[in-house]
Image: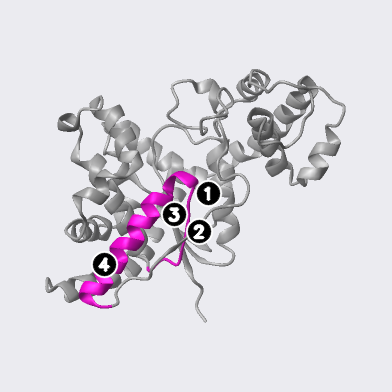
Amino acid sequence: MSKKRIFSGAQPTGELHIGNYLGALKNWVALQEEYEAFYCIVNLHAITMPQDPAVLRQKTLDLARIYLAAGVDPSRSTIFIQSDVPEHAELAWVLTTRSRMGELERMTQFKDKMQKSGGGNRERTGVGILTYPVLMAADILLYQTDLVPIGQDQKQHLELTRDLAERFNRDFGDTFVIPDGYIPPVGAKIQSLQDPAKKMSKSDDNAAGAIFLLDDPETVTKKIKRAVTDSGTDTTFDESRPAITNLLTIYHLLTGKSQEECVEHFAGKGYGQFKGELAEVVVEFLRPFQDRVKDFDDESLKAILDAGADKARQVAGVTLDNVYKRTGIR
């Protein structure tokens, strides 16, 4: 029996942080062993906001290097750039014609992004801010995806994807697999070091809230030592103490120790000692990771991405051809 498929991707904007690794990349690596994996750099999504063209191109390639450094294996997974597979944009248009204004305007992230891009003014907000969830649906459905690794904030978008697939199947016959979401039980939402009520974000105005994957050791250590903590002195997992729980979760996931082992290890030790050990763990994780990022020169990276795009187009082309035939376009 052939393996089931997974699809996921990240935008080449900002800098990826430890939360992106623990909540996404780490799971991608594990899931590629069990599933036929398609991992994409979604650069078409990035241009819904203004971008410097040269910076966008470089960040696209840098993100591919980060995928590879994290352990995404091109012999097991298909790694490619979204714009190298035109079928993404073509299917997005077909699905846009099946989408409804009301369901797109209800997207929580549409409201958030409208605030950022147009100052909350609907008249000044780019149309791409409204329709990019449809492109996300096309990304997923093109590959007849069974499983989509997602964060908590993407659940609404996956529901839209499922709705669009079911609507198309109802109107034109069975065409798309209805995908399920995969949310890791721990680490799906690493919080800001400066505000544990907020998710760690690569676009946060306060860079001290995130540990970026390319941060140097001194910067990592400063950020962890300056991270906010809760009242009290016990280093334990406790939902009522989100700051220390967040830091302890990072330690737990990077060391592979159980939660019980982590709590026992830091019993009777103060926050200062805990932060010092956490900083050492993060630095020692990032050191070889950053070395691996440098392993892929432009030529070898291009070969991997070109091969990935060829494989992706073979699969995506079959889906799009079927869609066009069912809708009478071809």
> Can residue 317 be seen at all in this image of the molecule?
no
Provide the residue designation for mark 4: 167
Q: In the image, residue 237 lies at what x, y percent?
A: 72, 37
Question: Can you say whether 244 is above or below 165 in the image?
Answer: above
Q: In the image, residue 97 lies at what x, y percent?
A: 16, 58
The chief SS type of the magenta part is helix
Q: Earlier in the sequence, mark 3 or mark 1?
A: 3
> Is residue 282 found left or right of 57 in the rendered image?
right
As shown in the figure, which amino acid type bears the numbered disc 4?
Arg
Query: Do the residues under discs 2 and 1 have CB atoms within 8 angstroms?
Result: yes
| Mark 2 crowdedness (10 Å alpha carbons): few <14, some 14-19, many ≥20 | some
Which element type, helix, strand or loop, lies under badge 2? Answer: loop
Provide the residue designation for mark 3: 8
Q: In the image, residue 217 lies at what x, y percent?
A: 65, 25
| Mark 4 crowdedness (10 Å alpha carbons): few <14, some 14-19, many ≥20 | some
Q: Quadrant of residue 290?
A: top right
Which element type, helix, strand or loop, lies under badge 1? Answer: helix
Q: Earlier in the sequence, mark 1 or mark 4?
A: 1
Provide the residue designation for mark 2: 74
> Is residue 228 found left or right of 75 in the rendered image?
right
| Mark 3 crowdedness (10 Å alpha carbons): few <14, some 14-19, many ≥20 | many
> Is residue 146 found left or right of 276 in the rendered image?
left
Q: In the image, residue 186 lies at what x, y percent?
A: 63, 47
Tell me the magenta residue range: 144-173
Choose mark 4 or mark 2, whichever is in front: 4
> Is residue 297 found left or right of 110 in the rendered image?
right
| Mark 1 crowdedness (10 Å alpha carbons): few <14, some 14-19, many ≥20 | many
Choose mark 2 or mark 3, whichever is in front: 3
